[in-house]
Amino acid sequence: MNLILLIDILGTIAFAISGVLTALNKRLDPFGILIIAFVTAVGGGTLRDVLIDVPIAWMRNLTYVYVILVSTIFAVIFRKRLGYIRRSLFLFDTIGISLFTIIGVEKGIATGFHPVICVALGTMTACFGGVIRDILCNEIPIIFRKEIYATACILGAIAYFLLHYFPVSEGFIVIISGAIVFTVRFLAVYFKLSLPSIYTKKELEN
């Protein structure tokens, strides 16, 4: 198994569990839990593959489907051991965006796109599964709030390209880029950092 496929599988697991935790918080039935886990895990990647006109990964490789099924069953069975749902959701969601940002960038590079487009594809891959999850669960998607979410993905994707100018192996570039996404997102939540608001205090009160 090559490094990129391994990262893709790990990201799928993280996002599937993230979807299960959200569905459990909404008290959905087993079918609803599976659907939310599935769209969270492959939603961003599916949109990316459609836009760049390549075969959709999970439709060509059923490993992704099996991984989502197993991850869903695991998360449901061990939901009490995952601790507080809110904390676990944040952890798995952050792991997911860290891994999927790199996958999206790699897909863009393999297709021959400009680095700017590759950064956009990485951000889309990381964020849009969560967007679909939140919309289906009647939540305002995190990416549309003030929280630093997509910004972390963009910084990690940019770092991926910048690191190629240094004598660093491909494996370390992947690890460092993913770590930047995770660290920026973690620090933003821990220190309650957010993007500046365009609304005045009076507008927010109305």
Image: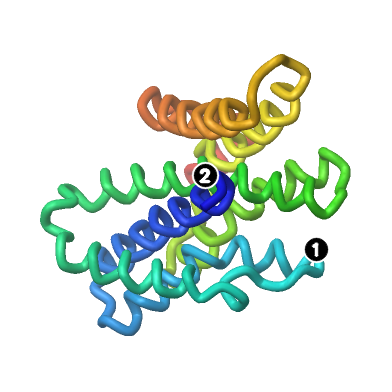
Q: Nearer the viewer, residue 129 or 139?
A: 129
Up-down relation of residue 174 to residue 90 (above or below): above
Which quadrant of the figure has residue 48?
bottom right
Amino acid residing under circle 1: Ile
Task: Calculate the distance from the C-alpha at mark 2 to the C-alpha at mark 1.
Answer: 20 Å
Q: Nearer the viewer, residue 53 or 126?
A: 53
Q: Nearer the viewer, residue 189 or 1?
A: 1
Residue lying furthest top: 167
Which residue in the structure is indicated by mark 2?
Answer: 99
Q: Residue at x 51, y 46 (%)?
A: 97
Q: Residue at x 82, y 38 (%)?
A: 115
Up-down relation of residue 190 to residue 104 (above or below): above
Amino acid residing under circle 2: Leu
Q: Position of residue 9 (x, y in %)?
A: 47, 56
Q: What element does badge 2 sit on?
A: helix
Q: Residue at x 40, y 73 (%)?
A: 66
Up-down relation of residue 107 to residue 119 (above or below): below
Mark 1 nearby-residue class (10 Å; few <14, some 14–19, many ≥20): few
Mark 2 nearby-residue class (10 Å; few <14, some 14–19, many ≥20): many
Residue lying furthest left: 80
Q: Position of residue 3 (x, y in %)?
A: 55, 44
Residue 52: mark in rendering = 1
Q: Residue at x 54, y 40 (%)?
A: 149
| Residue 75 located left or right of residue 151 | left
Query: Sequence-wise, which precedes: disc 2 or disc 1?
Result: 1
